[in-house]
Image (spheres, helix red, strand yellow):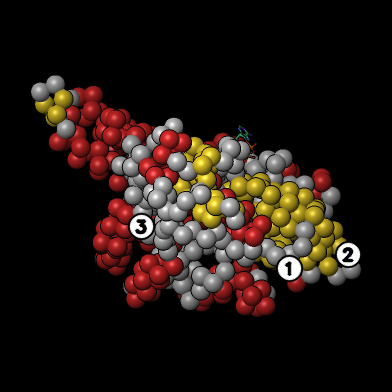
Amino acid sequence: MSLPVTDVQRDLIDLVRRFVSTEIVPLEFELDPDESELSAPVLERLTTKTKQMGLYNIDVPEEFGGAGLDTVTRTLLAMEMSQHRAGLYAPCYAAFGQPDMGQLYDGTDEQKERYLYPVLRAEKKSFFALTEPSGGSDPARAIQTRAKRDGSDWIINGNKTFISGADTADFGLVFARTGDQESGRSGITCFIVDADTPGFTVRRVIHTLRSGHCPTELTFEDVRVPAAAVLGEVGQGFALATERLTKNRIPYAAGCLGVAMKAHRMAVEYAGTRSVFGSTLAEHEGIQWMLVDNEIDLRSATLITLDAAERADSGQPFRTEVALAKIVATEAAGRVVDRAIQIHGGYGVTKDLPLERWYRELRIRRIGEGSTETQKMIVSRDLLRGRYRGLLDR
Amino acid sequence: MIRPWLPLTAANLADVPGALGVFEISDPSGVIAIEYAGGHSSFGLRGRLERWLDERPGLSFRYERTNSYLSRYRELVRAFENEHGEPPEQPNRTDQRLEGDR
Ligand SMILES: Cc1cc2nc3c(=O)[nH]c(=O)nc-3n(C[C@H](O)[C@H](O)[C@H](O)COP(=O)(O)OP(=O)(O)OC[C@H]3O[C@@H](n4cnc5c(N)ncnc54)[C@H](O)[C@@H]3O)c2cc1C
């Protein structure tokens, strides 16, 4: 395994790094420390620049007008884009485009016109509704929301929970059971549901550690959608959900590492200037070891994450590598930010510094997008069923 | 919000904590503003509410302490919009997002 940074990638990294330090960080002196959004005129000013850079819609394939980056480059840039206060969940405040709704690439032409292109033009917002009160780790079994045929229409009934952004969205991807409860993953279908469809309600906002953005609870009461609302094939919704989720976990892991890299750099600088017991913090072994532990966490997690990205680009199966990256990056980043806070003492937990926000939000990252435990299940399943090939066998 | 409405007076504000949170301002016509005291506000809720003291006579206020001040603020604004079809009047400020929260 190497750390492949080409000249082109280096230039892109420098470009994004400069963008973060000159365009984003100064804004954060003014914004509330928990803010995740910019006003429309400020965002428009920034997106004009990212479009000139050729990096607008960074996650989108070229055929849909996006940047069309390979996964390794995207991963390297994700590590840069998150290096500011809101960077974990709102990297550069979406100046590089909205989060990927890649499931829509598989839609019909009509679905693309009505949903995909407006999302890419930032004219429509969407939500992704998989998790239910009955559980999010094992949605294939847990989904109880049902869709029944009525003529050529479908009628959806049920509840979803922890759905991010549904309170401001124009439409959502809703995963409902169309087979019987024992049908597992083959009984789940994905529907596109407009937020103004009668019977669809955002019942409440769920307040979490992350104040700038919130998940919601949804209710579907006899929500009638046409056959044209089915995304992909009936019964193939689960594959549609998980395929994209798997790939998205690579930049997701990289974003955690970006934040942790920034926290580590802050800790190194602070340790060199803060005096305690007659010398700087950096001269005390207890602090040096914390910094070394940060370095070990960051280097190992970065290599594992880039390995997953390289694997995804190679066209070979990458599920195990992605699961490892998701575990290692989220857990390591949490430890690094925790140590950085400790090194900053009282200042570390104030809202004057971004560390406390990263600490809170990183905690969610070990649960969202496939928790640490469910990722471990993926790796162990592949290990024990003989599908997994270790690093040296590949 | 379940806290009772109180007249907006210096004496009543003296008891408001300098904490993070959200608050509503009303006049006899109903709620006219929903705001938050965020991470930049000097003296938190009390500091933000003091800005309203000389705005106009006959105002009342109620508040809620919360660390989830942004999501709670957006929830309250959205609930108001759902009920009234438009956002509250917000006469005393511009976009809190732009001016920060000082
Ligand atoms: C802020 C936030 C935003 C979210 N946004 C969205 C969204 O937009 N759309 C969406 O669909 N979902 C969303 N989620 C839901 C998220 O994906 C789920 O919370 C997650 O999948 C875990 O599901 P659960 O909370 O139901 O926990 P459960 O499935 O009930 O699991 C509980 C705990 O047990 C662990 N566990 C599960 N199985 C095993 C096992 N076999 N062995 C050991 N431990 C196990 C889990 O890891 C977890 O720690 C969001 C969640 C949060 C917190």
Q: Residue at x 54, y 50 (%)?
A: B26
Residue B4 image point, x, y percent = 58, 37
Q: Is residue A244 above or below residue A63?
A: above
Q: Secondary structure at mark 3?
A: loop
Q: Residue furthest front?
A: B57
Q: Secondary structure at mark 2?
A: strand
Q: What crowding class fits label 3: few (fewer than 14 Cα within 10 Å), some (14-19), or many (20 or more)?
A: few
Q: CA distance from mark 2 to mark 1?
A: 14 Å
Of the numbered discs 2 and 1, the one sitting upstream in the chain is 2
Q: Which residue is mark 2?
A: A150
Tell me: A7 left or right of B23. Answer: left
Q: Amino acid at mark 2?
A: Asp
Q: Amino acid at mark 3?
A: Glu
Q: Residue furthest left?
A: A278
Q: CA distance from mark 1 to mark 3?
A: 42 Å
Q: Is residue A41 above or below residue A82?
A: below
Q: Residue at x 53, y 55 (%)?
A: B32
Q: Chain of mark 3?
A: B
